[in-house]
């Protein structure tokens, strides 16, 4: 039976911009030539964090040196805020999730991915979504999610919503009526809600389960069990507004692809020995828009209305 269209539990298209103190971008200041002195770089944290700007500061400093522009960082509240910020010309450079990037493009936002996040040097710019349960749960597979209180991350999250939704549909479970969906707001919040029993089952990106929360002492090995893994998902991209001057866009793209990594930033004095980039990764690798066709195929499975909103 064909899946029915998904409403997405909160459509991106009707979201309001939620960037605290969002500054004026290049596209706004000069009518679209993209040659103003200040550019806005926006991202959202994958976990509850107040230090995202600190994590991106080495990249920001490098971009300022490469472009001769001032880079203003904005921490957004959710993916919808980034999409609407780029649509409104308030954001010039943005880190998306793969799904939210596809949503942005599908809804007419003029932005293009230039690089995707990689966990370690030489690694592929991809990761997986995990379906998880409390260690004491009798659930052994995704079919067992039927009827359960289920934590997702965000309606615009690739590994925390889109791929899990496709997985549930493939098991014959309606993601709206076959479970009780809960939006946790972050990958860490989803994992911790499952560990504490606030949600019976849930979804989050692999590294949050395998390493990040354990290293931070917020989760113990074995507190949750992984009962489902998605196919490899395109890594979170950095996308640059098409409204910027082409020469400037090229400078930004090359800098992110070649220099937004721990090795370059450390060796050139942008950060110290404990250097990390963004969401605690090695850096970024070059990709193009076609890299996200896998996300588009999953959109075809889910029939999520967000995928076709324009």
Image: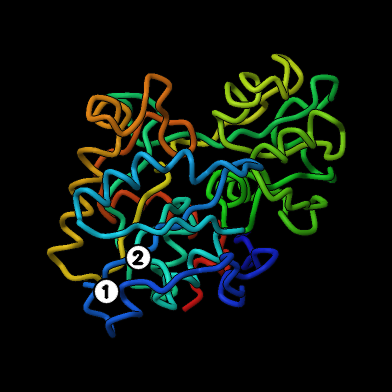
The reply to whether the C-beta atoms of the residues labelled 2 and 1 are less than 8 Å apart is: yes
4 lies above or below 285: below
Q: 10 Å neighbourhood of mark 2: few (<14), some, or many (≥20)?
A: many
Rendering coords of residue 304 (x, y %): 58, 64
* Residue 92, above or below 281: below
- Give the left or right position of residue 212, taking residue 117 as reference: right
The one of 214 and 37 positioned closer to us in this rendering = 37
Residue that label 1 marks = 243
Disc 2 element? loop
Image quadrant where residue 136 sits: top right
Quadrant hosting residue 194: top right
Farthest top residue in view = 221
Q: Secondary structure at mark 1?
A: loop
Return the residue found at the far left.
247
Above or below for 210 versus 25: above
Q: Position of residue 153 (x, y in %)?
A: 66, 48
Mark 2 and mark 1 lie on one chain; the one further toward the N terminus is 2
Q: Quadrant of the N terminus?
A: bottom right
The quarter of the picture where residue 264 lies is top left
Specify few, some or many for label 1: CA neighbours under 10 Å numbering under 14, 14-19, or 20 or more.
Answer: many
The residue located at (70%, 19%) in the rendering is 217
**Residue tagged 2:** 92
Of the pair 136 and 214, the residue shown nearer to us? 214
């Amino acid at each position: 039976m064909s899946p029915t269209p998904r409403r997405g539990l909160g459509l991106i298209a009707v979201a309001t911009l939620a960037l605290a103190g969002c500054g004026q971008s290049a596209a706004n200041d000069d009518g679209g030539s993209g040659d103003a002195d200040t550019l806005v770089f926006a991202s959202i944290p994958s976990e509850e964090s107040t230090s995202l700007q600190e994590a991106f500061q080495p990249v920001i400093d490098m971009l300022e040196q490469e472009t001769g522009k001032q880079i203003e960082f904005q921490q957004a509240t959710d993916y919808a805020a980034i999409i609407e910020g780029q649509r409104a010309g308030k954001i010039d450079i943005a880190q998306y999730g793969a799904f939210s990037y596809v949503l942005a493009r599908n809804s007419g936002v003029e932005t293009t991915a230039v690089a995707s996040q990689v966990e370690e040097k030489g690694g592929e710019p991809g990761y997986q979504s995990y379906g998880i349960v409390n260690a004491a749960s009798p659930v052994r597979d995704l079919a067992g999610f039927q009827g359960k209180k289920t934590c997702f991350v965000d309606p615009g999250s690739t590994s925390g919503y889109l791929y899990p939704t496709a997985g549930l549909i493939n098991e014959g479970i309606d993601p709206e009526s076959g479970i009780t969906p809960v939006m946790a707001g972050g990958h860490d919040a989803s994992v911790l809600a499952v560990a504490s029993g606030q949600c019976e089952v849930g979804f989050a990106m692999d590294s949050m389960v395998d390493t990040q929360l354990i290293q931070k002492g917020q989760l113990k090995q074995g507190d949750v069990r992984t009962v489902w893994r998605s196919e490899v998902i395109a890594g979170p991209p950095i996308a640059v507004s098409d409204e910027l001057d082409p020469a400037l866009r090229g400078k930004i793209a090359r800098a992110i692809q070649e220099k937004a990594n721990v090795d370059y930033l450390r060796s050139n004095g942008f950060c110290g020995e404990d250097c990390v980039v963004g969401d605690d990764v090695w850096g970024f690798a070059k990709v193009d828009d076609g890299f996200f066709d896998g996300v588009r195929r999953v959109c075809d499975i889910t029939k999520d209305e967000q995928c076709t909103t324009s």
